[in-house]
Image (cartoon, rainbow, N blue to C red):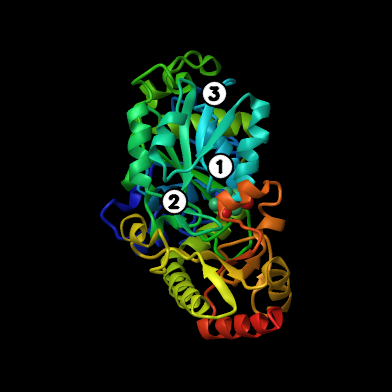
Amino acid sequence: MSSDQSGPSYGFDTLQIHAGARPDPATGARQVPIYQTTAYVFRDADHAAALFNLQEVGYIYSRLTNPTVAALGERIAALEGGVGAVCCSSGHAAQIMALFPLMAPGKNIVASTRLYGGTVTQFSQTIKRFGWSAKFVDFDDLDAVRDAIDDDTQAVFGEAIANPGGYIMDVRAVADVADAAGIPLIIDNTSATPYLCRPIEHGATLVVHSTTKFLTGNGTVTGGCVVDSGNFDWTASDRFPSLSAPEPAYHGLKFAETFGPLAFTFHSIAIGLRDLGMTLNPQAAHYTLMGIETLSLRMDRHVANAEKIAKWLEADDRVDYVTYAGLESSPYFDRVKTVCPRGAGALFTFAVKGGYDACIKLIENLEIFSHVANLGDTRSLIIHSASTTHRQLDEDQQRAAGADPEVVRVSIGIEDADDLIADLDQALAKATA
Ligand SMILES: *Cc1c(COP(=O)(O)O)cnc(C)c1O
């Protein structure tokens, strides 16, 4: 579970291939095997008891832990600079898993208005059924963030690079506000990936991912991950009893006292995965491990293509505006240097002259771009967010999230940029004829 088998001094390109992966002890297999098993034979009754008491770390049952899934967690933790990670069945599962040890009925989180549409729905509707709630504020207004935090606020939640508008969050500034209030900052780092942004270095406590996107990279499997920085002192107040107080389900064990910086990770596995069951399967973990091996190479190309295409679109008369933060015209251009110095990612929106109807015609006439509800694929993707991924939001929420009705969202792939530009050129001609 901890990340440092490969040593903290290795560079990103080395870690993305080697972290969490060692030759299989049984066979010497060099690639991480897909441990397609639900259960693991105990050495004897004492071994079984020690595992169930959390006195010894090992494998019991794949709802909790599996060696292939564990390798993936170690790898993502290493890339994010965290101490541990827990993988789950989707990005949305990861968000619930991140909140679960922190929350209780009556508690709330303060969340950015600029979030993935599904997250806005999960936070504004679904979590109410657990007795949790979310207050949405503009994270560029630090006073508003400060004012929204009350005695029942358990976390602050934002996206480093926010889908769909290409908004870049000042992670450090918001982390300082959360710190002053004694609560953790959770960053959804899906759009940036640890190659472009490492939120823990900017003060985040937890990092969540939809590994479905750039980390896997090929649009093959859904998955999620929660990485713990290990930096938060859960015992500094009595605000987080799940981590600091005796746990009745484990004979009064105190996670923070027993596991130190790994308390959150152990709680997520021993309680979260055990009882919520949002487990990642080993096949999916295998695909994601394969994807991560080339993450840095893909992200460099994603960014180079996005920059070239955003510039081309911005200069085109048929386009009203482009929101890519890598453009000098973006209000977030200066934040790129500090938050994500290797580039502003591959997601942005642009407004087609002719509004909604022109957006739809553009999408229908593209040949290389696929019209899908996904992002972070090697393939270039396009969608009209307001009528799809952000459909459950009202128009004010859509605009606040950057999903205005007159824009399309693109996820730029790693094909030839010139081919993508030619495709956009012909489809824009038809859309605005
Ligand atoms: C896709 C996505 C999610 C949800 O992840 P799933 O794997 O689809 O559950 C959460 N946050 C962001 C930024 C996303 O892009």
> Which quadrant: the C terminus?
bottom right
Disc 1 crowd, CA 10 A, few/some/many (<14, 14-19, 20+) = many
Pointer 3 residue = 107
Identify the residue under disc 2. Answer: 160
Q: Does ligand 1 reach within 8 Å of label 1's beta carbon?
A: yes
The secondary structure type at the circle numbered 3 is: loop
Judge: label 3 CB < 8 Å from ligand 1.
Answer: no
Residue 137 seen in render? yes
Residue occupied by mark 1 = 94
- Nearer to me, 365 or 39: 365
Q: CA distance from mark 1 to mark 2?
A: 16 Å
Asked whether residue 184 appears in the rendered view, the answer is: no
From the image, state whether disc 1 or disc 2 is nearer to you: 2
Residue 84 percent across, percent down from the top left: 41, 41
Front one among 156 and 394: 394
Task: Give how far across and how far down residue 122 sits, in percent.
Answer: 64, 39
Q: Report the front residue among 403 and 178.
A: 403
> In this image, 4 relative to 352: left or right?
left
How far across and how far down the image is residue 10, in percent? Answer: 29, 58
